[in-house]
Amino acid sequence: MSRQLETKLREAVASLFERGEIDLVIGHEAGSLPLRSRPVFVRDAADIERLVWGPNCTNNLAVYLPRLFAHPKNLREEYAPPTVGIIAKGCDARSVLGLVKEHQLPREKVVIIGMPCTGMIDPKKVEAALDGARIIGAREEAGSLTVETPGGEKTLGLAEMLADGCLECAHPTIDEADVAIEGEARSPADERYQRVAAFEQMSGEERWAYFSDEISRCIRCYACRQVCPNCYCVTCFADQTKPRWIGAADELPDLMAFHIGRILHQAGRCVECDACVRACPMDIDLRVFTQKMPKDVEALYGYVAGMSADGVPALLTFTENDDEGFISEP
Amino acid sequence: MTNPYLPLPVTIDKITIENDAKDLKTFRLRFEREEDAAAFQYECGQFAMLSVAGAGESPIGIASSPLDEGYIEFTVKRYPTGVVTTVLHNLVEGATMGVRGPYGNAYPLAEMEGKNIVIVSGGFAFTTLRSTIRYLLHESQRSRFNNITAIYGARSPGELLYKDELAAWEAQDGIEMVITVDKGDEGWSGREGFVPTVLQEVAPSAEDAYVLVCGPPIMLKFTMPPLIELGFPPERIITSLERKMTCGIGKCGRCNVGSYYVCKDGPVFTYAQLQEIPEAVL
Amino acid sequence: MKRGKIDKTDLRKLLAAASEKARCAGPVADRVGVKLEELTADSVLALDYDNFRLSPKLWFFPRSEVIASGSNGTLEATPLPEEATVLFGLRPCDAASLELLDKIFLDEAYLDPYYKARRENTTIITLACNDPDPACFCTSVGGGPGASSGADVVAFDLGSELLFEAVTEKGEAFLAEHDGLLTAPSNADDTAKEKLIADAEAKLQPVTIDGVADKLAGLFDAPVWETIGERCVGCGTCTYLCPTCHCFGLYDEEADGNVKRIRAQDACMFPLFTLEASGHNPRSTQGARARQRVMHKFSYTVSNVGETFCVGCGRCVSHCPVNIDIREILEEVGA
């Protein structure tokens, strides 16, 4: 299935270049490790062959857009951003629309090439299924994943290898794609936010203990922040020196302050793409914390991030009937 | 064992406000311990880390001459965005702070013996050259060198540093002072003109001469070509490079430019050296 | 040099004995992998791991530490760490990285007293690799799955037994102290060990390093940097996981009149690394920053201390969120 989508994708990109509708396309190409893909910037029709599609095209490419559209610091410098095509799963496309809504890029300069996403592989699930055997290669074929190990090939069911975030995805594809690559996407999940709901049932002490345990592994590499399309602040609050909001050490309060700040800044904006979860080199269970924001915002305000480029972001407006349950008596 | 990260305690003996904008101050510091004062042996062109506990550290060129006894001086500009300089400027005489150093290499004065020395400087980059002029003009050192010419410019008369000293140097024979400002005011009867322009007007001879040049990047960019035209070979054009620094001792990596560490292999470099380092864009 | 064998089931006993005189750390499993952790009475050793996620450089150059503190404007140096430490389970690449870091922190002109104290107080027992990770390339940078650089004792995994070989006097002293738990290795053991190491070496894919330092000198303006920079998101994963990266920042923090001066790791990949108070940033593009990291590790350190600052551990390759692969960069540069 992925091969066919890949062909359609390349054809669509070739047309866009031919018609002069884009200057650049950001997509995925083969990575240097088994099961990995990597972002690729294609400016030339000759490079279209590098574009791939498969259940390992995990990166949220919208992260590259604010950089491309940032105004130069010197006002006299020419501001001529390219028209950018972007290969987008449902979550990635919602990131793009979210950025448009926050005035980080003009809608007309982005061509969303929407892919019908059937879910992304979680390499850790593959490793677990192989009982520690090394992965030398992998290929996807109609619902299965055949993995090459030193001891021979093993075929796994693709559905069991999908990332938890994908299993709970409500928007595998979106209507607002400019170019919709034809194909069958996953059905939106019926059961969502299960882990978050289970976590919410834990006692305050248990939740705090888990949070402390997970966050204590943080090394402040900021991979979570740097891969997030929503984290486009020129100077992040974590890096400000005047005033210094967070300490520079790896004391637990400093680490927690960063994550609590970053996660809360995602309220009404996070599209649950799992980029932060995948990027974290310390395997911190970020998902159970980051998913709380979109869950709450949807429950409280009926708002889902990134479904359109119009309108006002959830936390920039209010209605009279807004839930006030969070206000407690002093 | 000495801890290279630990600042030595100093007392602020005197603070002089150098300019009309009041954001340039000269701090005269005295080591609280005799042995620290004795150990702090420096040469013209070196810098030290000024430490303000609670704010941090800032690398500042040493403005006093090695022959000044009993104190060391630093002229510091306050940047509104600066974590350290803003707090430093709020300190008062008598306050305690810290100094680590001296760090970096020095102007190659020994190499310049018997030669003519030209000094070209603009803005508050003049501080280590003030140290140098004080040293060169000292009665124990003057005879080692030939003619000394100094061209120093500031944006406006109020921005000139060390005004009393400049007047004293203008009055004496040991040095030819050429002071200029970008734009004068009603009280100003001296020269007007950008430093690179004045340099071309003064046209000091490159024969048997070294030139020490310090200034903001934009001034250096327009000063190097006239110096080359005047015949100064790149090995005899001496300048001081600036980068953000942290440790000052060649470990933290922040001031790494090419394979050099500005804090250890610099900040003094010849133009010939800088031409070999692609990242040291001038 | 002294050698000895121990049954794997007795390893815990050996380390428990070492714990009587020193803080002892070994490989312990947690929720996400195996890490190098101080052993307690309850610790269970886990010997089936490729490598620790975090490099053991952190035992000598911690992610953050208070180097001075005080009040009323003065600062006193933090007392030097004195605790004797035994680290078991470092891979040879990580041990080799310490000898590289020595060239920076033990530089005679400005000796780092904290690093020196920790190095002197620590005995390092490495665990040679039988099955390198596909991303590893230690043999290409002068190392090897059984190499001894940086180790006091090297342990070889023979299956049910570990074969210890002392490398330094410190290692000799360690094995002598625990002599009672060791048995003499046989010729068969040596043959087995040699085969394991040879097999491991054969699995490693070579990466071009020869000539890279010189070639890099002429590639400052090459377009490859902006291509990498375009994809690089500017996080610190590669730097913070790297066994030889050592850039740091100094930060003062004040609370209730007490000041702490903290040294914390930093990364040249971050945009703010070289940002000056005036607003000028000499490395204003991500390509310039990516270039700096590669140049520093593969060219500048070669000029300055005669060493490439890479031990081929493969962490940056495995964990870069956008799959920037240093091996590919080196191949392209070396070509």
Image (cartoon, rainbow, N blue to C red):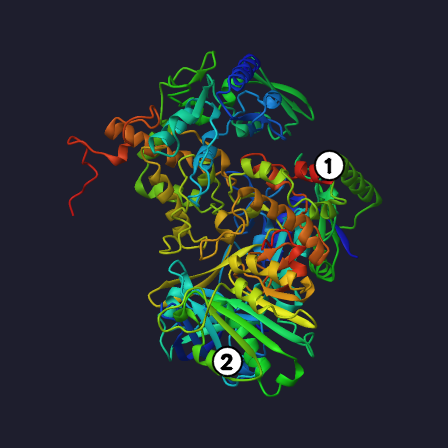
Tell me the SS state at disc 2.
Answer: helix
Q: Chain of mark 2?
A: B
In the foreground, A54 or C168:
A54
Q: Is residue C325 left or right of residue C210?
A: left
In the foreground, B40 or B114:
B114
Mark 2 crowdedness (10 Å alpha carbons): few <14, some 14-19, many ≥20: some
Tell me the SS state at disc 1.
Answer: loop
Note whether C90 is above or below B172 in the view shown: above
The three-letter code of the residue at mark 1 reads: Leu
Which mark, residue C204? Answer: 1
Tell me the mark number nearer the camera, choosing from 2 and 1.
2
Report whether residue C152 is seen. no
Q: Is residue A129 left or right of residue C1?
A: left
Q: Chain of mark 1?
A: C
Report whether residue A209 is seen. yes
Note whether A8 is above or below A95 in the view shown: above
Mark 1 crowdedness (10 Å alpha carbons): few <14, some 14-19, many ≥20: many
Of the 4 image quadrants, the one containing the C terminus of chain C is top right
**Res C146 → quadrant:** top right
Q: Is residue C335 left or right of residue A241?
A: right
Distance in Å between CA atoms under marks 2 and 1: 71 Å
> Which residue is labeled 2 in the image?
B170
Residue extending furthest right?
C187
Q: Are marks 2 and 1 in contact (CB under 8 Å)?
A: no
**Res C100 → quadrant:** bottom right
Q: Position of residue B52 (x, y in %)?
A: 42, 69
